[in-house]
């Protein structure tokens, strides 16, 4: 037994003493260390494992009161930050089915402006409990219905007067008097104008999906239909007298009318471009079409062409009702143009230098 231990000890001594064995062992250790370091460097820095965060969803409670009596109507709960006013209206409709979302008006304070459907709860919230005031907006109709009714009525009404139905004019007088060519031309121009409106409403304009009170539809139809009846009655009357300067006045005004109608159409096509609508809209820029070059001078060229059409129609027919109608829509469109021009100045100040709202260098 002692001999065996001695033999093992002697072998260890020999390994330690032998220089070749020592060198080979050191070389192997260096190679292993080098390969390990290369592997660690290739692996890159150590990345900490991100901790899983559980997002907390904040819910709001909305108390809806009657704007007149201040009595509580209902409470809409479990409303998230990203919910919109339209979502609140949908939940309000489920709680109170007799009020559809289109006729629900919500305000932050009594007498204040109605909140837009796209407003988020987060933008109006001060605390977890929000108080909104409800107002019944009455019977609502879509904007598409409003525009179609506004433009279909004048088209049909004018044709009824043009055909000289017996209930409007005296048949004997109508049969005795021949119509002046300007009467036929006026009917053609009037139909072209409202047919363009109808087609653009259906295929060009991106009409808002919102609604408007029924009373606005009635007012708009009364205005357009009433003035169309007044204009058509005089222009198609058997005793209608042609313009003072004859065919020259008629021809020039008719050509100008068609130019303005074409310009209005091309401007509306440009405005319907996705880059010119929505929150990320950019100011419309002229293109190769000469009719769009009006954007260099005014910010609302569609109103410019519209007024140009009606001024031309007034000169062509030389009737008082058309002149009064032209004056009224000029006033209304100038107000719309100035309002839009102010918005454009805030959004696109660099593009609005030296531009007018509707009439170049004047308005």
Image (cartoon, helix red, strand yellow):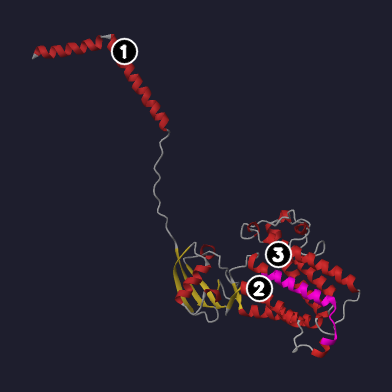
Mark 2 or mark 3: which is in front?
A: 2
Can you say whether 163 is above or below 123 in the image? below
Disc on res. 61:
none
Label 3 and label 1: CA atoms lie apart by 90 Å
Residue at position x 88%, y 76% from top? 243
Asked if the magenta segment contains residue 44, the reply would be no
| Picture quadrant where residue 157 is located | bottom right
> Tag 3's secondary structure?
helix
| Location of the C terminus (image quadrant) | bottom right
Pointer 1 residue: 23
Label 2 crowd (10 A; few <14 / some 14-19 / many >=20)? some
Counting residues from the N terminus, which is met first, the one under dot 3 or under dot 1? 1
Label 2 and label 1: CA atoms lie apart by 98 Å
Mark 3 or mark 1: which is in front?
A: 3
Which one is nearer the viewer's eye here, 173 or 61?
A: 173
Main SS type for the magenta part? helix
Pointer 3 residue: 340
Q: Give the magenta part as a residue range.
A: 175-198
- Residue 88: x %, y % from top left: 49, 70
Residue at position x 73%, y 66% from top? 337
Q: Residue furthest front?
A: 175
Asked if the magenta segment contains residue 187, the reply would be yes
- Residue 7: x %, y % from top left: 14, 11
- Residue 234: x %, y % from top left: 81, 82
Say if residue 322 shows up in the picture.
Answer: yes
Q: Is residue 187 left or right of residue 112?
A: right
Q: Is disc 2 in contact with disc 3, using a CB cutoff of under 8 Å?
A: no
Residue at position x 56%, y 73% from top? 109
Pointer 2 residue: 147
| Location of the N terminus (image quadrant) | top left
């Amino acid at each position: 037994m002692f001999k065996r231990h001695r033999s093992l000890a002697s072998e260890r001594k020999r390994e330690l003493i032998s220089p070749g064995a020592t060198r080979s062992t050191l070389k192997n250790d260096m190679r292993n260390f080098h390969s390990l370091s290369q592997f660690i460097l290739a692996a890159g820095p150590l990345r900490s494992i991100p901790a899983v965060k559980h997002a907390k969803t904040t819910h709001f409670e909305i108390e809806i009161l009657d704007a007149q009596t201040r009595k509580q109507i209902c409470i809409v709960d479990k409303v998230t930050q990203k919910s919109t006013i339209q979502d609140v209206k949908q939940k309000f409709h489920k709680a109170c089915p007799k009020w559809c979302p289109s006729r629900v008006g919500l305000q932050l304070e009594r007498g204040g402006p109605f909140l837009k459907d796209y407003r988020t709860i987060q933008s109006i919230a001060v605390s977890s409990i929000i108080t909104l005031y409800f107002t019944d907006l009455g019977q609502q109709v879509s904007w598409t219905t409003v525009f179609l009714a506004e433009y279909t009525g004048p088209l049909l009404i004018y044709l009824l007067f043009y055909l000289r139905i017996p209930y409007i004019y005296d048949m004997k007088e109508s049969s005795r008097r021949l119509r002046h060519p300007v009467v036929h031309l006026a009917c053609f121009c009037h139909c072209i104008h409202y047919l363009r409106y109808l087609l653009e409403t259906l295929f060009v304009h991106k009409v808002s999906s919102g609604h408007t009170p029924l009373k606005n539809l009635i007012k708009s139809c009364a205005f357009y239909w009433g003035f169309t009846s007044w204009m058509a009655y005089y222009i198609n009357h058997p005793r209608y007298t042609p313009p003072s300067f004859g065919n020259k006045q008629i021809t020039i005004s008719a050509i100008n009318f068609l130019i303005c109608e074409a310009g209005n159409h091309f401007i509306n096509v440009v405005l319907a471009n996705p880059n010119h609508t929505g929150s990320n809209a950019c100011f419309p820029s002229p293109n190769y079409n000469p009719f769009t070059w009006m954007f260099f001078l005014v910010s609302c060229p569609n109103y410019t062409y519209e007024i140009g059409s009606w001024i031309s129609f007034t000169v062509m027919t030389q009737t008082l009702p058309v002149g009064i109608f032209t004056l009224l829509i000029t006033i209304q469109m100038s107000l719309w143009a100035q309002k839009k021009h102010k918005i454009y100045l805030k959004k696109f100040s660099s593009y609005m230098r030296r531009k007018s709202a509707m009439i170049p260098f004047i308005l």
